[in-house]
Amino acid sequence: MDERELREVIRAAVVRTLGGREDPATAEPSRPAPRPAAPEDVTLAKRAALWMGAPLPPPPILGRWQPRGGRDFYLARTPARLGVGSAGVRYRTDTILRFQEDHAAARDAVASTVDPQVAASLGLVSLQSAAKDRATFLRRPDLGRRLSDASREVVQKQGIRGPQVQIVAVDGLSAQALNTNLPLLVPPLTTILSRAGVRLGTPFVVSLGRVVVADEVARLTGAEVLCLLVGERPGLKTAESMGAYVTYMKVRQFNEAMRTVISNIHAGGLPPAEAAVQVAETVLRALREKRTGVEVS
């Protein structure tokens, strides 16, 4: 058996094992139904196909689905870790290094703090939750959901009473997200709302806070709509993602389903400038319809 015949035999075996179809012109006229391929058979068939330089037929479970492109086509359209490959039983070195870099950035984001210069440049009045330090904040989420006594007094003394919209920024689990995105989002957001004739409240920023802490600020000022900008939980895709929660506050009984959320605000997701327009439109709709959340179609 020469090399050409050997390749034909291997090609036919690969096609049968991986669920592909042979060319009818070269297929044998009669053949018993093949047994289900064992995992080791599939592995060997893939190795043989790679050795031959032959494309792998899609597995039968995909039916008639055909990929739109190769590996590079899909990698160019998502930051997800797809097709990272391996070196023996381990990930490739560049994959491990990128993972460690992204993981370190996520850890740094959790430990980050709001930049006082960013807050001052945007006119944000600083507040703090009932958590005394970051270690307590991480261990006691309940303390991050309410203001400290001193911060309550600040809101009562400096907050504009009865605004239509109360803007509150909260560091959440990534103050770095605020430092990066607030300067790009808050100015156009306030400009759009002011031009629409909306009466804005005193803007605040809460350190060591969770989402719910902004509700307390809105209730203390008597705001109609709360616009919360919060640092989202960092992941291995980005540590700078921010979310916007728009909530109509003048309701008798409140539940979390009454929030409208715009998430994934960062340079690699929803750009802050575009997010400012979406958040403003959501706020204006909340004022018109006097509702937010799942009830809004």
Image (cartoon, helix red, strand yellow):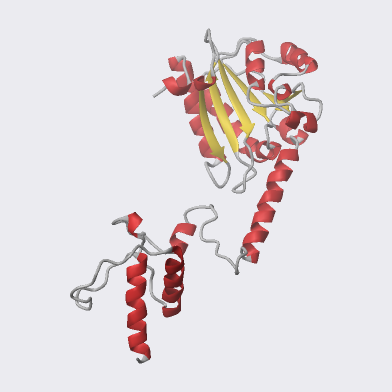
295 sits left or right of 150 in the view: left
Query: Which residue is at a point 47% across and 22% down the rendered structure image?
Result: 293
Query: Which residue is at a point 57% across and 45% down the rendered structure image?
Result: 267
172 sits left or right of 40 in the view: right
Instruction: Tell me if I can see residue 222 in this picture.
Output: yes
Query: Which residue is at a point 18% across and 75% down the rendered structure image?
Result: 29
Quadrant into which the N terminus falls: bottom left
Query: Which residue is at a point 70% across and 36% down the rendered structure image?
Result: 175
Q: Position of residue 25 (x, y in %)?
A: 19, 77
Q: Position of residue 24 (x, y in %)?
A: 20, 73
Instruction: Tell me if I can see residue 124 in this picture.
Output: no
Which quarter of the figure has residue 59? bottom left
Q: Nearer the viewer, residue 198 or 249?
A: 249
254 sits left or right of 138 in the view: left
How many labels, in total? Answer: 0
Q: Nearer the viewer, residue 26 or 270?
A: 26
Furthest toward the top, the residue is: 252
Which quarter of the figure has residue 191? top right
Quadrant into which the C terminus falls: top left
Q: Position of residue 106 (x, y in %)?
A: 68, 45
265 above or below 10?
Answer: above
72 sits left or right of 12 in the view: right
267 above or below 275?
Answer: below
Q: Position of residue 257 (x, y in %)?
A: 50, 21
Q: Nearer the viewer, residue 119 or 11?
A: 11
Which quarter of the figure has residue 19? bottom left
